[in-house]
């Protein structure tokens, strides 16, 4: 259950769909029809079903009128504040959140306009409460796409982006987050991580669903640290890495010994127990 004024909800819907230009030509990505309703209906319906009464919807300033008109026709009960941001289609997710920070006064949930899933947000919120987390992120299994599945656009096969996601087996804490493309054959795991988390799994078949529950202090941090432009690619890995930092210690700890892990051996999952 979502208690009044405990969490705010933010729907990020300013993206232009740069990887599906054949579909988005002439209309905002968030309004693409899926099963006869606009894409943005799905995350809003998730929020409404989970007990949220209000949501801030962030869109491109150029699309604000069209999105507002469309949402008025959807019959949703959740109250929506449509916020238009100039150039939102070219901004990162952290940039968009930073620009609306004056509208956010509590811990908040961020959900992408392209999340279509049968999920129970209350479980995610309860996990956030239980651990008093800075950020709680939803990870989902990478969907299986049939070999004969055809998508509009160039015929060249796109390489699937793979993340390396380390999750503590006992607590569910996110302890490692990196893109596999950043490593050729091996990547390093610090001895400090191995000591602090004695049993964790590094997954390569999970994907970030772009749904986050974020503590208000993280937003305050974003406001004063404008070098972060994205949540998933920059802010979240930074927060994860800072869990291992000692007080008054440089992020670049040159004295920390490392363990090398073969990236190729994590094609499915790497199980590590008391290594």
Image (tube, grey):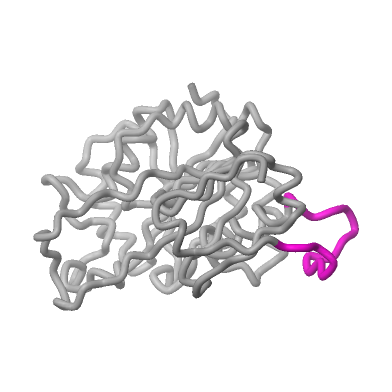
Decide which of 50, 150 is in the foreground and name it.
Answer: 150
Looking at the image, which residue sits at the far top? 1
Q: Image height check: is 61 above or below 78?
A: below
* Residue drawn at 56 percent across, 30 percent down: 127
Decide which of 128, 46 is in the foreground and name it.
Answer: 128
Residue 133 is situated, as x and y percent measured from the top left of the image, at 65, 38
Magenta portion: prevailing SS class: loop
Residue 176 is situated, as x and y percent measured from the top left of the image, at 60, 53
Looking at the image, which residue sits at the far right? 248
* Residue drawn at 41 percent across, 49 percent down: 206
* One can see residue 57 in this view: no
What is the span of residues highlighted in magenta in the rendered image? 243-258
Name which quarter of the figure residue 55 lies in: top left
Residue 253 is situated, as x and y percent measured from the top left of the image, at 81, 66
* Residue drawn at 43 percent across, 68 percent down: 88
**Residue 194 as seen in the image, left or right of residue 7:** right
Residue 255 lies in the magenta stretch = yes
Q: Image height check: is 143 above or below 189?
A: above
* Residue drawn at 46 percent across, 59 percent down: 265
**Residue 119 as seen in the image, left or right of residue 154:** right
Residue 109 is situated, as x and y percent measured from the top left of the image, at 51, 42
**Residue 175 as seen in the image, left or right of residue 255:** left
* One can see residue 201 in this view: yes
Q: Image height check: is 273 above or below 1?
A: below
Q: How many marks?
A: 0
Decide which of 183, 78 is in the foreground and name it.
Answer: 183
């Amino acid at each position: 259950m979502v208690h009044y004024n405990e969490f705010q909800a933010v729907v990020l819907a300013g993206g232009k769909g740069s990887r599906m230009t054949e579909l988005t030509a002439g209309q905002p990505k968030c309004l693409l029809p899926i099963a006869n309703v606009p894409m943005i209906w799905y995350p809003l319906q998730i929020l409404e079903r989970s007990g949220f009464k209000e949501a801030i919807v962030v869109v491109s300033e150029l699309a604000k009128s069209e999105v507002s008109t469309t949402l008025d026709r959807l019959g949703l009960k959740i109250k929506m504040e449509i916020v238009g941001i100039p150039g939102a289609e070219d901004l990162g997710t952290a940039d968009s959140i930073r620009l609306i920070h004056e509208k956010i006064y509590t811990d908040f949930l961020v959900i992408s306009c392209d999340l279509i899933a049968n999920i129970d947000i209350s479980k995610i919120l309860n996990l956030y409460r239980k651990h008093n987390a800075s950020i709680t992120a939803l990870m989902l299994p990478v969907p299986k796409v049939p070999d004969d599945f055809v998508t509009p656009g160039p015929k060249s096969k796109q390489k699937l982006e793979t993340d390396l996601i380390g999750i503590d087996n006992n607590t569910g804490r996110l302890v490692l987050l990196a893109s596999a493309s950043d490593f050729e054959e091996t990547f390093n795991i610090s001895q400090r991580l191995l000591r602090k988390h004695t049993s964790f799994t590094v997954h390569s078949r999970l994907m970030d669903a772009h749904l986050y529950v974020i503590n208000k202090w993280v937003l305050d941090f974003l406001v004063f640290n404008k070098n972060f432009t994205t949540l998933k690619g920059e802010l979240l890995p930074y927060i994860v890495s800072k869990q291992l930092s000692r007080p008054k210690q440089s992020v670049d700890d040159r004295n920390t010994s490392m363990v090398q892990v073969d990236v190729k051996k994590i094609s499915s999952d790497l199980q590590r127990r008391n290594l």
